[in-house]
Each structure stands twice: as structure tokens, then as C-alpha cells.
Amino acid sequence: MLKQLDEILTSVAAAIAASDSLADLDSVEINVVGRKQGRLTAILKTLGGLSIEEKKIVGPRAQKVKIEIEILIAARRAELEAVSGAGLIDISEPVLPKQNYGALHPISIVREDLEKFFRSKGFLVLDGPELESEFYNFEVLNIPADHPARDMQDTFYIKDHPSLVMRTHTSGMQVRALETYGAPLAAVVPGRCFRNEATDVRHEHTFYQFEGFVVGERVTLGDLKGVLEACATHLYGPSTRVRLRPKFYPFVEPGVNGEVTCSMCGGAGCTLCKGTGWLEIFGCGMIHPEVLRAAKLDPEKVSGFAFGLGLTRIAMLKFGVGDVREFNAGDLNFLQQTIW
Ligand SMILES: [Zn+2]
């Protein structure tokens, strides 16, 4: 009988190790310790008919075999459950491929990178309302109702609420932030903006801007250029250069375009930069005295600069996206690419 017990233990241990599903393991268990058909159960049932001497030898041995088998079954069950995902979770299991995990949108990747950069330079990161008053979107920025600059920004007005607009830029936050925090102040404002554009590969009605401004005593155009150079080298590498060219914006004086050496050709001229070697990245300038006054500041005492860049444009350049409409289309084939 002892020999029989040893044989059962050996063969059952092999069967447990070989079982590759929970169903397999269940049938091994039933065949050895099941109440009706278990081989070991059958032996245990015969113990009653043995002499006392035999019982003293066979009884403990049979119980030991039963416990060993139960331990082997429990261990194998835990392994199989971990693999199938049922029951216990084994956190040391390698990640299974081809799962649909969420990821950051390419615009968010660019935005978070710039937020981190400017925060490291001491800038506040602020948020502003997408549904903005006409007052903060235009009036405080030196763009009164009859100003031709309003025509440059095809605006979504809100039906039955003539004083509200979907903000056309993040610049309204210059005055909102200065009203809240006063000067000196250095802040950036990333955010979504809206214009009533006819959409094509380069134009979209919903896009993302990144606004920055510094206001304080003796802030100069030289400071602006320094900040733009730091930002441009962060984005495009240490050999990137910045040049400023005059351009009109109603809320800065003087207003300038901040151009950087083309990230693709390094300034030699290519299709991306249309042969010029330069890419327009920043719209910027010294904050107009009227804007400072709107923020209840004295332009004789403080000055400031502001700059804005298109997060959408930065993402297009960084990832080589040819059609701006891809970013808002919600197309998983676009979003699940591994280039981000
Ligand atoms: Zn180029």
C-alpha cells in the first residue's frame, strides 16, 4: 500500500505540472482526491479495514501524500490564474503586447514640454476662459469695436449674448492676470482658441496657442529676445538662432515677428521654410501702454513684453504633420502612431 501511495504522488505531481489550464487542473484534482472517483480517496476509505499496526504506518503516510498533493494543486492553480488574469494578479508578469493603452495627445506633449520649460524659468502657468467677454478679448487689448484689426480675427459670437465670444487668442489673459497678480509678473497661458476659418490643411477653426508675458520695471525688447532664444534653443537645439522683424499687432508697440532658423535645413533653405532658411514661430512685442493702463498699471513705471506661439504649429513641425485638421479629427489611426 505504501508503494501505491508513492506511485500516486509521483504520477499526480507530474499531471499537476503538466496541466496547462484551470480545467485540466480541476480534472486532475477530481481524479485523485475527488469524493467519488479519487484514487487517493479510495485508499483512504480502506484504512478502516487495516490492523492497528498497519494503520499506524499507512495512515500518517497517506495523510502526508494528500497534503502534498493539495499544496501542489494550490500552487499550480495560482500560476494558471495569474496567466489567465483571473484571481491573483502577478505584478511581475511582463506587459502583454498590443493592448490599447491611453496616451497623451501630440498637442498635450508639446504643451507640457513648454510648460515645464517656462516653469523652470520662474513663469506662472495660468489658465483662462475659452468663452471670453468681448471686453477682455478685444477692448483691453487696444482693439475697439471699430478697429480694423477685428477683421483679422473672424470671430465666433454667441447667439443672444452679444458681449461674449469664443476667444480668438489667449492674449486677453495678459490683462486678467495683471489684474489678479499685479506687477512684476512672468506668466505663460496655454489654451484653446477659436476662429471662424474656412478649414484646409493649414487652417482650422479650433487651435492651440501658448501665450507668455513679463511685466516689471525696466523690461526691454532685449529681454524678450533673450527669452525667445532660450525657448527656441529648447525646442530646436543649441545652434538655433532668432531674428526679430517688425510686424503690426494692435496690443504691442513695437510689434515683431520672432523667426527661428529652419529646424529642417538649419538655415540653408528648403521647402519647409520656402527657401528663406527661417520659420515664423513667435508673434510678439512690447506690451502697448494702453494695455498696461487697462490692467491699472502705469506705463511710465512698468513695461513688459508679450509673445505668443501656436502649439498646433509647433506640433506640426515637431512631428511632421502635414494637415492641421488631423489634431481634432479623433482618428485613432492618426493618434495611435508611435511617432509621438
Ligand atoms: Zn528650411
Image (cartoon, rainbow, N blue to C red):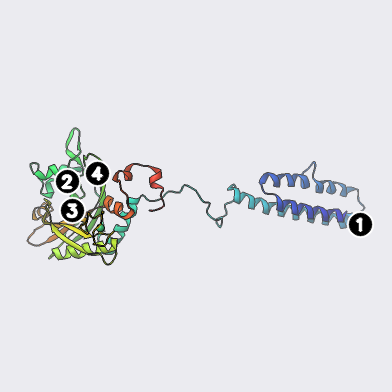
The answer to whether the residue bearing label 2 lies less than 8 angstroms from the nearest atom of ligand 1 is no
Q: How much space separates mark 4 and mark 1, taking CA atoms?
A: 96 Å
SS state under label 4: loop
Q: How much space separates mark 3 and mark 1, taking CA atoms?
A: 97 Å
- Residue 180, percent from left and from top: 19, 54
| Disc 2 + disc 3, Cβ < 8 Å | no
Q: Earlier in the sequence, mark 2 or mark 3?
A: 2
**93 sits left or right of 251 in the view:** right
| Disc 1 + disc 2, Cβ < 8 Å | no
Q: Quadrant of residue 293?
A: bottom left
Q: How much space separates mark 1 and mark 2, taking CA atoms?
A: 100 Å
User: Which is more foreground, mark 3 or mark 4?
Assistant: 4
Q: Earlier in the sequence, mark 1 or mark 2?
A: 1
Query: Would residue 122 be visible to someone looking at this image?
Result: no
Query: Residue sitting at 30 percent across and 52 percent down?
Result: 315
SS state under label 1: helix
SS state under label 2: helix
Amino acid type indicated by mark 3: Gln
Q: Which residue is mark 2?
A: 137
Query: Residue sitting at 13 percent across and 43 percent down?
Result: 150
Q: Dot 1: within a 10 Å radius of its alpha carbon, few (fewer than 14), some, or many (20 or more) residues?
A: few
Mark drawn on residue 53? 1
Amino acid type indicated by mark 1: Glu
Q: Earlier in the sequence, mark 3 or mark 4?
A: 3
Q: How much space separates mark 3 and mark 4, taking CA atoms?
A: 25 Å
Q: Dot 3: within a 10 Å radius of its alpha carbon, few (fewer than 14), some, or many (20 or more) residues?
A: many
Q: Which residue is mark 3?
A: 174
